Image (tube, coloured by chain):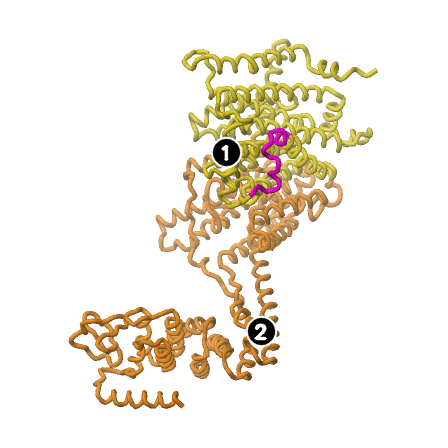
Chain colours: A orange, B yellow
């Protein structure tokens, strides 16, 4: 009863005021505006909610001003400054003289929450789709019962299906506090389709009798929580799988070159990590060139960097093979030491040429951001691009090894060197080219690494142990084995990281690999037949 | 009747070897400490603290090199994880040194500073007994050896050899380094142990203590050489070299290579641990960086430079490389890695038998 009389009086009052005031433009209800400056927070909030439901852009501006502490009260008038002049907040009329004493309207936390809800509700009716979408998202977590009618109204008007779905969700959230049990049940039903941890958090209190008197609603809420949890678990698992695959593809890129030089040719190349570094620095070099000469195409420097890095690393690799490694074929331990020495020289050369500090290699714009696959599962573009790039490199390598004359020669030489030489394969040159190919692919790995880690002289060192593990785990001489080993290592590492943290995960993976190698020294995919013992 | 052990032991080293050892003993146990302690700094014959510390350090490295040579030169197994055993020995003794600081740390607590920093209230269980020197020595002798034994048992049992073995030992020391980098592991994380104050109540930086540590390192090196000499000339050593050269044949004759490899591997790890324990009080710091794969592989180059398969070679190699290192890193810090890298390449390409091999070849040419 009092509610009604209150509204009535307010209505009459506003009518009266309207008669007296001369509005300059589309005006707001002055009584309601005055209420914003009331001492009592509840009355303020009531007014804010009314404004929020009004769908009036002018109300939006007013509430925005209030949220920014720009709404002032003095001489019993609510006003704000428009440059030097003071204007009445309701009518927009100039106030002269400016009141002597004034203060901004106090906004405490409760009021601020109400304000942001009301502002979001107002935005639901904006003409711009983007604004509506943001507003609908904003209301996902903290919609109170008071916005429910607004949301219902917005749902009726909304034509966009994505926003519609968000609004439905927000509406259901708002209705969780509805005194009517049927409304709550409907709300819980809608929410059970959600996949967000926040919704789960809001539903959890409903499981207790103290918060939820109705047994059917409780049961429905329990069911909904269970559904959401299983969906969350799936999302989380998928996210981990993806980061695992992306780590695996990085490992694979780092190890693929090694799979040729070590796996196929049997050369222990401890300088392999430094060939990755050469690729990464080549990327940096191309980026610098683009900055200086082609700033308009800077976003595409990465595409140009791919061949440059390949040939730079391949060149360094062939040089190493011709000068040092060639003399050590068949002496694996000596090769190991000599190539370690080469890696030291390369690291120091990078330090002298480019400085000991890390250099900055920027992500192109088209690689930033990500795609949202489902709620809580966002795949970053740079990771997706790297997975795609790995597939490209794999395909390239497969074609080179299986479909070209060089590939045929490489396979022939590794299977039976004297026989290949007898039928006219220039074995020495094939060795150099095969090593160059492995090195070039390491260079491609360097391009990918430059996009996700720091580029510095020491960057290769961290990958050498991992790369060898991939090759050894996959089985020497097996390109397919390397793929499975890299993906497996990546995914296992990411899951372990989720449980125990990064360092312990790394250690556990190393221990697992060590144990695994003891059990199956030939790797996942053992070679069969007469090559086994050599 | 079998020759008594002591006779066999004495006969293992030739007369020239005993004479050289005697000279070395006189120099390191008497002359150098005396010149360091008794002469004033102004005297031209005074041996400075720098020389004492540097040569003490190099002798520790030489022990590691001999240990490496026993496993690589004589058994043909290239370990890239020997830095781990060295560091473990250092950490085991470092725990005692940390406890000897007592309440003189920055936080005046009876706990080591880093534990106070982590807000730990008491010592973790594995620090029990670390205030006793005897316990510390026991740890130095047993823990790295145990780690090596377990690792070696599984590796050699599955007949992992060659490059595979090298790579998994590298992975082993890498994993251990990551583990010790964690603060929660309880060994000071990144910073490791440092700021040692005393040993058995005596100031660790005093000239007397430095001379003592120096002499102990020399003694340990000499004992290592004698033991090594005895081992490689014994029947055991012959089987070991046979395994290196033709493992399958040795097996067909009826030997089980597992025990031979396992013994020399564990013994080698133990020597590294002793060297590490002597090294830490002399340089005053131990941190997980000592376990980095780069450190372990550097040990291999000392041995390669000196000459594999000889016992004096690794000592010469460790001495040469580290003298160069301490000179280069001060004089031309930019070029040290170039030099070290070139050394790796050059030695493997042109000096497969190291400096001692070169010496032998020159001598052979002169007599021919």
Q: Residue at x 51, y 65 (%)?
A: A372
Tag 2: Cα neighbours inside 10 Å, few (<14), some, or many (≥20)? few
The residue stretch that appears in magenta:
B122-137
The structure residue drawn at horizontal position 47% and vertical position 20%, both measured from the top left corner, is: B49
Task: Evaluate whether residue B11 shows in this view.
Answer: yes
Callout 2: residue from which chain? Answer: A
B155 vs A56, left or right, is right
Residue located beneath label 1 in the image: B194
Question: In the rendered structure, does residue A524 fall within the stretch colored magenta?
Answer: no
In percent of width and height, residue B63 lies at 60, 24
- Residue at 23% x, 74% y is A74
The percent coordinates of residue A34 (x first, y second) are 28, 80
* Residue B288, picture quadrant: top right
Q: Secondary structure at mark 2?
A: loop
Magenta highlight on residue B136: yes
In the rendered image, the vertical position of residue A203 relative to residue A16, given as above or below? above
Residue identifier under label 2: A208
Label 1 marks which chain's residue?
Answer: B
Asked whether B149 or A75 is in front, the reply is: A75
| Left-right relation of A361 to B316 | left
Question: As displayed, is residue B181 above or below residue A240?
Answer: above
The lab-note entry on whether marks 2 and 1 share a chain reads no
| Residue A134 as seen in the image, left or right of residue B84 | left
**Residue A186: image x %, image y %?**
55, 81
Q: Quadrant of residue A205?
A: bottom right
């Amino acid at each position: 009863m009092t509610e009604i009389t209150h509204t009535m009086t307010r209505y009459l009052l506003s009518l009266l005021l309207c008669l007296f005031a001369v509005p300059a433009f589309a005006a707001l209800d002055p009584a309601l505006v005055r209420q914003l400056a009331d001492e009592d927070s509840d009355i303020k909030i009531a007014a804010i909610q009314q404004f929020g439901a009004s769908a009036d852009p002018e109300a939006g501006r007013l509430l925005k001003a209030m949220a920014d502490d720009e709404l002032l009260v003095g001489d019993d008038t609510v006003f704000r400054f428009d440059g030097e002049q003071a204007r009445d907040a309701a009518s927009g009329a100039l106030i002269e003289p400016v009141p002597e004493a004034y203060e901004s309207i106090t906004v405490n936390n409760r009021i601020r929450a109400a304000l942001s809800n009301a502002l979001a509700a107002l935005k639901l009716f904006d003409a711009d789709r983007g604004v509506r979408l943001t507003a609908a998202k904003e209301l996902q977590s903290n919609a109170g019962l008071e916005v429910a009618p607004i949301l219902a109204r917005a749902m009726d008007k909304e034509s966009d299906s994505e926003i519609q779905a968000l609004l439905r969700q927000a509406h259901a959230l708002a209705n969780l506090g509805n005194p009517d049990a049927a409304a709550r049940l409907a709300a819980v039903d809608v929410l059970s389709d959600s996949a967000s941890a926040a919704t789960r958090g809001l539903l959890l209190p409903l499981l207790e009798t103290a918060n939820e008197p109705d047994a059917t609603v409780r049961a429905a809420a329990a069911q909904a929580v269970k559904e959401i949890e299983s969906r969350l678990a799936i999302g989380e698992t998928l996210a981990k799988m993806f980061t695992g695959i992306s780590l695996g593809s990085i490992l694979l890129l780092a190890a693929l070159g090694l799979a040729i030089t070590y796996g196929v040719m049997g050369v222990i190349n401890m300088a392999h990590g430094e060939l990755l570094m050469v690729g990464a620095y080549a990327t940096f070099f191309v980026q610098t060139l683009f900055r200086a000469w082609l700033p308009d195409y800077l976003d595409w420097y990465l595409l140009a960097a791919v061949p440059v890095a390949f040939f730079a690393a391949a060149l360094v690799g062939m040089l190493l093979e011709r000068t040092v490694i060639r003399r050590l074929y068949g002496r694996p331990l000596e090769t190991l030491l000599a190539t370690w020495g080469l890696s030291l020289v390369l690291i120091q050369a990078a330090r002298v040429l480019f400085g000991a500090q890390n250099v900055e290699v920027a992500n192109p714009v088209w690689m930033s951001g990500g795609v949202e696959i489902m709620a809580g599962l966002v795949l970053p573009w740079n990771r997706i691009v790297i997975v795609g790039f790995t597939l490209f490199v794999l395909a390239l390598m497969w074609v080179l090894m299986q479909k070209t004359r060089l590939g045929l020669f490489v396979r022939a030489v590794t299977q039976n060197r004297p026989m290949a030489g007898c039928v006219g394969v220039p074995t020495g040159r094939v060795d150099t080219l095969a090593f160059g190919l492995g090195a070039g692919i390491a260079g491609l790995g360097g391009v990918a690494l430059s996009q996700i880690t720091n580029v510095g002289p020491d960057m290769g060192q961290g990958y050498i142990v991992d790369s060898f593990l991939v090759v050894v785990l996959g089985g020497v001489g097996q390109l397919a084995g390397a793929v499975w080993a890299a993906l497996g290592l990546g995914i296992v590492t990411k899951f372990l990281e989720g449980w125990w943290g990064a360092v312990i995960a790394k250690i556990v993976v190393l221990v697992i690999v060590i144990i695994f190698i003891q059990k199956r020294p030939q790797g996942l995919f053992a070679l069969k037949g007469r090559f086994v013992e050599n | 009747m079998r020759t008594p052990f002591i006779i066999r032991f004495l006969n293992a080293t030739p007369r020239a070897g005993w004479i050289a050892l005697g000279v070395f003993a006189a120099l390191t146990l008497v002359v150098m400490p005396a010149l360091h302690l008794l002469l004033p700094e102004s005297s031209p014959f005074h041996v400075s603290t720098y020389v004492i510390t540097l040569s003490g350090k190099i002798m520790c490295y030489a022990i590691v090199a001999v240990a490496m040579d026993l496993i690589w030169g004589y058994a043909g197994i290239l370990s890239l994880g020997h830095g781990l055993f060295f560091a473990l020995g250092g950490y085991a003794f470092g725990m005692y040194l940390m406890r000897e600081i007592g309440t003189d740390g920055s936080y005046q607590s009876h706990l080591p500073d880093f534990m106070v920093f982590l807000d730990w209230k008491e010592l973790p269980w594995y620090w029990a007994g670390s205030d006793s020197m005897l316990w510390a020595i026991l740890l130095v002798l047993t823990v790295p050896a145990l780690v090596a034994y377990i690792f070696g048992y599984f590796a050699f049992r599955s007949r992992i050899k060659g490059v595979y073995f090298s790579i998994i030992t590298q992975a082993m020391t890498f994993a251990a380094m990551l583990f010790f980098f964690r603060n929660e592991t309880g060994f000071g994380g990144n910073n490791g142990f440092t700021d040692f104050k005393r040993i058995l109540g005596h100031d660790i930086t005093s000239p007397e203590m430095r001379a003592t540590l120096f002499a102990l390192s020399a003694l340990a090196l000499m004992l290592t050489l004698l033991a090594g000499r005895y081992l490689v000339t014994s029947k055991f050593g012959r089987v070991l070299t046979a395994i290196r050269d033709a493992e399958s044949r040795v097996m067909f004759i009826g030997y089980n290579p597992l025990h031979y490899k396992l013994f020399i591997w564990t013994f080698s790890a133990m020597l590294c641990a002793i060297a590490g324990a002597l090294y830490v009080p002399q340089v005053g710091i131990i941190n997980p960086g000592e376990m980095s794969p780069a450190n372990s592989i550097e040990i291999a180059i000392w041995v390669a430079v000196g000459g594999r398969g000889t016992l004096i070679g690794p000592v010469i190699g460790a001495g040469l490389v580290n003298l160069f290192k301490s000179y280069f890193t001060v004089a031309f810090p930019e070029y040290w890695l170039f030099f070290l890298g070139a050394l790796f390449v050059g030695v493997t390409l042109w000096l497969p038998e190291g400096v001692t091999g070169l010496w032998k070849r020159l001598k052979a040419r002169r007599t021919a």
